[in-house]
Image: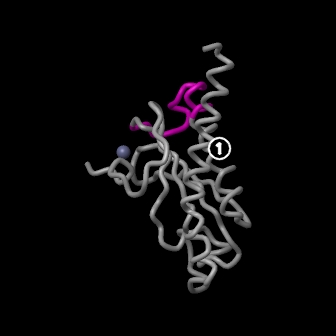
Amino acid sequence: MGCELCTVAGEVLVQSPEWRVVLVREAHYPGFCRVIWNAHVQEMTDLSEPQRNSLMSAVWQVEAAVREVMQPHKINLASLGNVVPHLHWHIIPRYTDDMHFPNPIWGQVERSVNAALHDRLGLLDQLSTTIKQKLNRHWMEANDTVGN
Ligand SMILES: [Zn+2]
């Protein structure tokens, strides 16, 4: 039973006990990230409320970082997982000149690669740093509230 989410396809940026953030290597979609729940769980409602909040706050931090650094026209958030029962969220920066816009990136191709792709590829180091900073800051604030 090979699970393609467990065999890391990309760079793990942040690893928590519950979930991990992966920068996906997708040639035409630089900045594409996944937040993957570590355990094999199928649906959001299989998680407890605190677990759901933990997962989604990671998704919001990644979305904020992708918006800030990649400056997309739109963010696509998707949780599909029809093939493997392993809960994860896709955070995908979209541009009006990307290959599939306005279709989903798994949909029909609308145009060939745009020159701006190279500029966007150049932002990935900054994106990686920003995601790590945001999630670390978020954890520190969460721990302060608890009173540690
Ligand atoms: Zn898996």
Pick the residue in front: 110 or 91.
91
Q: Is residue 126 above or below residue 144?
A: below
Front in this rendered view, residue 68 or 104? 68
**Relative to 109, is 7 on the left or the right?**
left
Disc 1: which residue = 61
Q: Position of residue 119 (x, y in %)?
A: 61, 75
Q: Is residue 28 shown above or below 17?
A: below
Residue type indicated by callout 1 = Gln
- At 38% from the left and 57% from the top, the residue drawn is 9
Residue pushed farthest right? 73
Instruction: Determine if the magenta segment contains residue 50.
Output: yes
Task: Give the image quarter of residue 116.
Answer: bottom right
- The stretch in magenta equals 40-54
Along the viewing direction, whichever of 120 and 103 lies nearer the viewer: 120
* View extreme (bottom): residue: 112
Q: Is residue 88 placed above or below 28 in the rendered structure?
A: above
Main SS class of the magenta portion in the image = helix
Locate the C terminus and report the quarter of the image it occupies.
top right
